[in-house]
Amino acid sequence: MGDRTGIAWTDATWNPWMGCRKVSQGCAHCYMYREQSRWGRNPLEVVRASPRTFRAPLTWSPLRWREPRRVFTCSWSDFFIEEADAWRPDAWDIIRRTPHLTYQVLTKRPERAAEHLPADWGTSGYPNVWLGVSVESERFVERLECLSKVPCQVHFVSAEPLLGSLRLGTLRGLGVDWVIVGGESGPGARPMDLNWAREIRDLCQEEQVPFFLKQLGGFPDSRSHEQARLDGRTWTEMPILGGGTRTLASVAPSTDNTSGKRPLSTGVPRHLEEFVERLRTKPRFTAEARVTISLPPVGVPGGVFLPDDERRPCALCQEFHWEGPCSIDRPTGTRHQVQKGRGQL
């Protein structure tokens, strides 16, 4: 646990409590049980973390990082497990006090979520909380249907370990904003058929839902990060952090680096299409690079168009948003200072 992690789809982990109970076949070889046993703890006993660990996010200052941070919450437990009911309000308070962090809450108990939200959750949830559900096989798709009824900024699915062909139905109809797929790792790992991952990948592409392939699975090598390749490439798509924008398109370049015209999406202004075409002619704009084009909030002029590896937050408020008067310093009319890093173009 801490402000660094090897989990590819997050930046940090936070465990306000530890310990869990297995509820389905996906839990059979859970790494938490191995790790807790290695530390001499009983993994079946749910215990609150030490005060230092519980309050750790309060020490993670936005001044330490150049980009917003994602925090996988309760990687060694379940955020909505019954034994943590007495401690969860304290955790919500810390989440509320750290808006610069985005908390990725993944659960196998979505039926308990609606009744254990904070009183000020509202109709769309906290802006810095994503709610996800684990669905390892067709048998547990009902978890997704249950989570879809809980209002949230981002709903996501983790099909890890993927144990069989999985028909998720209409993703957008269920409010799904992101899908993670991964094979099982660790001793006794059950193999994942790549066709199962392809089925989900193809569905995500069809419905324009970000798809993240975390690992192919196996033991002792889980084949993660650069080894997690499907049909010749890695898949690391994610929802956009920072809020305040609506994504129109994430545009992949042509594999031959030519500027052949390709439409973006209905309603995209022609000058934006031309902008992307110019990027495609750059010698380092490789097949795996992507450019995100977003619209500013209503009434905010201008825009910033940067390759994904150059995007930086506003120097004044540490958020991704559009050029124009910064909301933090609106009375003086100070304009956004978008910090460009060293890109690949």
Image (tube, rainbow, N blue to C red):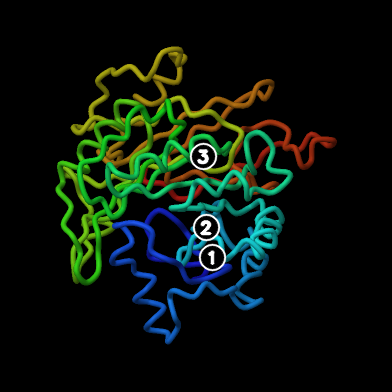
Q: Earlier in the sequence, mark 2 or mark 3?
A: 2
Q: Residue placed farthest to the bottom in the image?
A: 40
* Mark 2–mark 3 distance (CA, rounded to whole Å): 14 Å
Q: Residue at x 53, y 46 (%)?
A: 130
Please give the count of numbered marks on the rendered protein: 3
Residues at circles 1 and 2 in contact by the CB criterion of under 8 Å? yes
Q: Earlier in the sequence, mark 1 or mark 3?
A: 1
The amino acid beneath tag 1 is Trp
List the residue tagged with mark 3: 154
Residue 298 location, quadrant:
top right
Kind of element beneath mark 1: strand
Give residue 71's mark.
Answer: 2
Q: Does 55 appear above or below 199?
A: below
The image position of residue 336, as x and y in percent, is 67, 38
Q: Does 200 appear above or below 65?
A: above
Q: Residue at x 46, y 45 (%)?
A: 310
Q: Residue at x 49, y 40 (%)?
A: 147
Q: Does 316 appear above or below 301?
A: below
Q: Residue at x 58, y 42 (%)?
A: 242
Q: Quadrant of the C terminus?
A: top left
Give residue 14's mark.
Answer: 1
Kind of element beneath mark 3: strand
Q: Residues within 10 Å of mark 2 (few under 14, many from 20)?
A: many
Kind of element beneath mark 2: strand
Residue 188 location, quadrant:
bottom left
